[in-house]
Amino acid sequence: MTTSFIRLADLAASGQLHGKRVFIRADLNVPQDEAGNITDDTRIRASIPAIALALNAGAAVMVTSHLGRPTEGELTPEDSLAPIAERLASLMQREISLKTDWVNGVVVAAGQVVLLENCRGNKGEKKNSDELAQKMAALCDIYVNDAFGTAHRAEATTHGIAKYAKLSCAGPLLAAELDALGAALANPKRPMVAIVAGSKVSTKLTILKSLAAKVDQLVVGGGIANTFLLAQGLPIGKSLAEPDLVANAKEIINMMAARGASVPIPTDVVCGKAFSASEPAVTKTVADVTADDMIFDIGPNTAAALATIMQQAGTIVWNGPVGVFEFDQFGGGTKTLAEAVAASNAFSIAGGGDTLAAIAKYGITDKVSYISTGGGAFLEFLEGKSLPAVEILHQRAIE
């Protein structure tokens, strides 16, 4: 699953950025509180290497990103990248001005960087308008996509501009994502283990089926695991599940078994009667789950068995916590699993918002081989889908 593309780092090293106008599509879509204060600047920090690379190579740099879900053509103050410009300037210790109405022209000199207001405020962005893309391509000599989190969408700043720019390339963050994901999936060290958890099988059914054809063990968790328990004829009480997808769960179990691979089914679980931070946790074997129980985590025996699987793995792909880890009494399974991934010698790659939150909570960030910044893009890559923003970079590279 390797894809060829031009890298910004190579252009910088060969002196091709000097005096050029460089347009960087970053992912600066950071969480903010009700007052507009940034609550986590991880994505801003992750975008700096591409900007610094271009600046240090003598380029005039323009950066844009989406933020939230504004109505095209009707940006409100809440949609503005102003707080991002301020934080980016502080982190880079340099002046960074915010440009509005930038599509028809931007003034920026070599050695300067400007932030272009929320790209989703431009009419035609979401629909990948050719007219808009051509106007944006005219602003620059070199287009850089460094926003893996949006790579699964064909939009004007992720796809259209790449088609029309004189030269289009991948920034260091996007390149690192593709290198890591390619290494994990194209030629994985065996045994390969995938952890796929979440509330619904339906949202991850195609991923589960795709991985079932590749991995040696497919660990399911959360509401997904409850549907697989139902498929095995086991009781789940009032737990979140999708009974109409039991046949799909059985199909995945059979697909794996036919290859000599397996879906480890929980043997014990942690239950409660209500979804609440103060709800007492009761551990029981799966067979003992009663009609009024709700399963909120895997039990210690299941967690220990999964930890052994992680210890023996060659490659681990992780998407989703295996329990309601936000409540400590239902976080034991995810904590044990996180610590097992951290202790494993396997090449481990993790992605998805809840997974990253669990990794941060249990302090294993520096023990995971690669943490993906993309949610939807990460999942679509796992499915084996072509990512439009990556595919266009590939096409431009082989022209």
Image (spheres, rainbow, N blue to C red):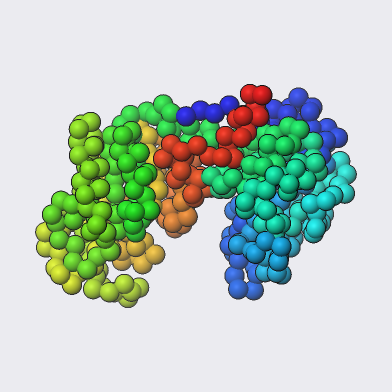
Vertical arrangement, residue 202 with respect to residue 174, above or below: below
Image position of 272 with respect to 180: above or below: below
- Quarter that holds the C terminus: top right
**Camera-nearest residue between 61 and 204:** 204
Residue 374 image position (x, y, % from top left):
52, 47
Residue 3 position (above or below residue 288): above
Q: Nearer the viewer, residue 195 or 343?
A: 195
Q: Residue at x 74, y 36 (%)?
A: 165
Residue 241 visible to an observer of this rendering = yes
Whether residue 148 is visible, yes or no, is: no
Percent x, y of residue 107: 87, 49
Q: Nearer the viewer, residue 325 or 34?
A: 34
Q: Position of residue 134 (x, y in %)?
A: 75, 43
Residue 209 figure quarter? top left
The image quadrant that residue 35 belongs to is bottom right
Count up the numbered dots.
0
As drawn, is 95 to the left or to the right of 309?
A: right
How far from the left and from the top, in percent, is residue 268? 18, 56
Measuring 59% from the left and 40% from the top, which residue is drawn there?
389
Between 228 and 392, the residue placed more toward the observer is 392
Residue shown at 40% from the left, 48% from the top: 319
Please indicate whether residue 397 sits to the left or right of residue 98 in the image: left
